[in-house]
Structure formats: C-alpha cells, structure tokens
Image: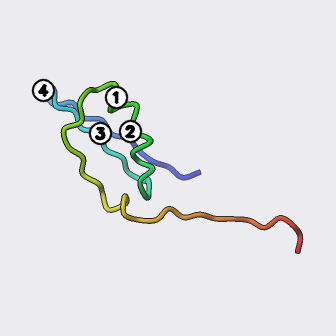
C-alpha cells in the first residue's frame, strides 16, 4: 500500500498549515478535507509537484487467458 504523510504546523500566531506528501494527483484534497473543516477558514492553497502527477493505476487480469 502506498505511504503518504500529512503534516500539520501551527505557528505561535495561530496560523495553521496542512501539507501532504506521497500522494499523486488531486486526491490529497480528500485527505485534508476533514482537517480543513475542523481548523477553520482556508485562506490559500498551494499544490505541490505531486498534485500535477497522474496516479499510477495497476490492473491485474485474473481470468487465466
């Protein structure tokens, strides 16, 4: 199973940053949605390079052909 990391940083001023590493494509938004709802208003977002990459999809044919 792929590994990912969610990092939450809260500054002394109360500014919160949520970062995701190890996730390709836009699915990182799904991972951070609950944090963003609990932490308050989102002021800005900045996609990482991984956000622009396509996730790897692997299929296995088990039909025996």
Q: Nearer the viewer, mark 3 or mark 4?
A: 3
Residue at mark 1 to residue at mark 4: CA–CA distance = 20 Å
> Does dot 1 land on a helix, a strand or a loop?
helix
Badge 2 or badge 4: first in the primary sequence: 4
Q: On the image, numbered disc 2 is attached to which residue?
A: 32
- Tell which residue pokes out farthest to the bottom in this image: 65
Query: Sequence-wise, which precedes: disc 3 or disc 2?
Result: 3
Q: Residues within 10 Å of mark 2 (few under 14, many from 20)?
A: some
Q: CA distance from mark 3 to mark 4?
A: 15 Å
Q: Nearer the viewer, residue 38 or 50?
A: 38
Classify the position of the C terminus by image quarter.
bottom right
Kindly state the secondary structure of the residue where label 4 is placed: loop
Picture quarter containing residue 42? top left
Mark found first going from the N terminus, 3 or 4: 4
Q: Are marks 1 and 4 in contact (CB under 8 Å)?
A: no
Q: Residues within 10 Å of mark 3 (few under 14, many from 20)?
A: some
**Residue 14 location in percent, x, y?**
15, 26
Q: In which quarter of the view is residue 49 placed?
A: bottom left
Instruction: Return the residue found at the far right.
Output: 64
Compared across the picture, whether 59 is left or right of 55 comes to: right
Front: mark 1 or 4: 1
27 and 16: which is toward the camera: 27
Q: Nearer the viewer, mark 2 or mark 4?
A: 2
Q: Name the residue carrying label 3.
A: 18
Residue 15 percent location from the top left of the image: 16, 31
- Name the residue carrying label 1: 37
Compare marks 3 and 1 and give the one earlier in the sequence: 3
Residue annotated with mark 4:
12
């Amino acid at each position: 199973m792929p590994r990912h990391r969610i990092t939450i940083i809260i500054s002394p001023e109360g500014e919160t940053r949520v970062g995701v590493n190890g996730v390709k494509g836009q699915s990182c938004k799904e991972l951070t949605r609950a944090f963003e709802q609990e932490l308050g208003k989102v002021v800005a977002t900045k996609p990482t390079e991984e956000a622009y990459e396509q996730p790897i999809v692997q299929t296995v044919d088990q039909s025996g052909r």
